[in-house]
Image: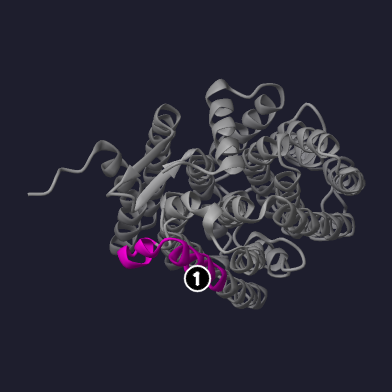
Amino acid sequence: MGALPSGWDLLMVTVLLTPISAAVLVGASRRVRLAEVATVVSAALVAIQAAGLMAGVVAEARLAAFGDFFSLDALGALILIPIAGVGLVTALYSVNYMRRQHERGIVDDRHLVRYYAGFNVFMLTMLVVPLANNTGLMWVAIEATTLVSVFLIMLYTTEGAIEAAWKYLIVATVGLSLALFGIVLFSYALSQASPSAASSGTAMDWTLMATYARSLDPAVVRVAYVFVLVGLGTKAGLAPMHTWLPDAHGEAPTPMSALLSGVLLNCAIYGILRFNIVASSTLGRGFPDALLIGLGLLSMGVAACSIYFSRDMKRMLAYSSVEHMGIISIAVGFGGLGLFAALLHIINHATAKPLMFFASGKVSQRYDTKVMADIRGVVRTMPLTAMLMLIGGLAMAGLPPFNIFLSELLVLTAGFGSGQIVATTLMMLFLALVFAGFLRHLVSMSFGSPKATGRVVPDLPLAGHGDSGPLAIVPMAILAVVVVVLGFYVPQPLQTLVHAAARVLGQGSTP
């Protein structure tokens, strides 16, 4: 008789079973109100279970379940927590936002049921990524996020949404195919270094790959890392493979845009970081770091110019995501303090970006447009939303005392400290251009009088006020509080987790 599952075995399984159970319930009932409740309750349970797993990682360094099929260390926990936290506030926000879309005739009951079922399956696919020890399973989960999110992006079935979804599907799938080839090459290198890994079927296990990293064939690893970086970099939105991102994030329902930018991109970055650990151990840091810094600077440069000249609010925020994935890439390339800064920036971006998408969604509903030139006087028409939008916008622009400023300052410090003067100077230039672009758009939308020809939509019965009620404001307020607090103080448990994840990223983890 086999041994009973441990507590961690059960917790890792239940955190995955929770969203899929909610998706089945939503699909079987086809009742909108039940779908809303099931999704919010599921997201709350996932957040509680993720917090338990994080506490376990802080206490034990690494958790394993069902042998080593599932594994969670500090780096994985750092990705898991934003998925769960942002998932919860997005579920809350979705109730108000999607009801409003329903009342405006944009979606019907069938669309809402499809949305909430897809939301829960999407949560499941993202949760698998940091829990999977097998790199092949991690790839399957990342590919599954693409397939599920395609249906959510084209929920409105408009021409623009369908085009964006197909573009995303094609570009992301091609990229992930390249990543799969790179993963197979890493697995081949491990099977050559450890024949027992090939015979036991563990040649794709991350923990084993990290253990034998210094024994892998450098020529194979060099090629494999390039394929993984280009492939997963496509999914992460790194330039020049970012072309799908502005269209997909711009056309998706706003809650989905928040999840795509705030946490889905982190899943792809996580995959890059895992293989960067192996490549750095095999090749030394020079080659992998040079590639990360180069792609990061290119991403920042493309994003900075695009943000400044953007007309559509959601596309501007999508380009901002390209910028911040570039910052994370550069920070990892700087090494040392940059590793801590990159991981902290993952957390900071995952809180500030959904706040901005939530605010943009309510503003676009109120003004019936995403074109920034047609949005004026938000402070007058939606005072609470305007205040929260300003907090998020100033944070994304990199102003103190908000959280993004802190992690960007640490990245710049790491850059100068590592002797990367040219790269750090270019990064400062791009940050200045992003700052100018964000403030230009933010100030023009927030202040002044609404245009006489503007399309300010009267409040529908659900809203009651210009700010659309508590179910819209509370999720934004929660994120705004986190954005402000993390600008002044990083709580000790989070510091401990980030430091532990930085050690994993810098040295590999011990199975």
User: Circle 1 sits on which residue?
Assistant: 184
- Identify which residue, 354 or 283, lies in the foreground: 283
Q: Is residue 258 above or below residue 248?
A: above
What count of labels does the image hold? 1
Q: Is residue 66 left or right of residue 409?
A: left
Residue 195 among magenta residues: yes
| Residue 337 visible in the picture | yes
Residue at 65%, 76% (x, y): give it.
Answer: 167
Residue with the most extreme left position = 1
Q: Residue at x 86, y 36 (%)?
A: 416
The boundaries of the magenta stretch are: 180-202
Residue 41 screen position, x and y as percent = 37, 42
Query: Residue 95: horizontal and vertical position, in percent?
Result: 49, 48
Magenta portion: prevailing SS class: helix
Camera-nearest residue between 342 and 367: 342
In the figure, 463 relative to 206: above or below?
above
**SS at badge 1:** helix
- Indicate the quadrant where residue 399 lies: top right
Is residue 112 at least partly visible in the picture?
Answer: no
Crowding at dot 1, Cα within 10 Å, few <14 / some 14-19 / many 20+, comes out as: some
Q: Is residue 186 magenta?
A: yes
Amino acid at circle 1: Val
Residue 509: give x, y in percent of width and height.
Answer: 49, 42
Q: Is residue 119 above or below residue 163?
A: above
Rendering coords of residue 368 (x, y %): 72, 58
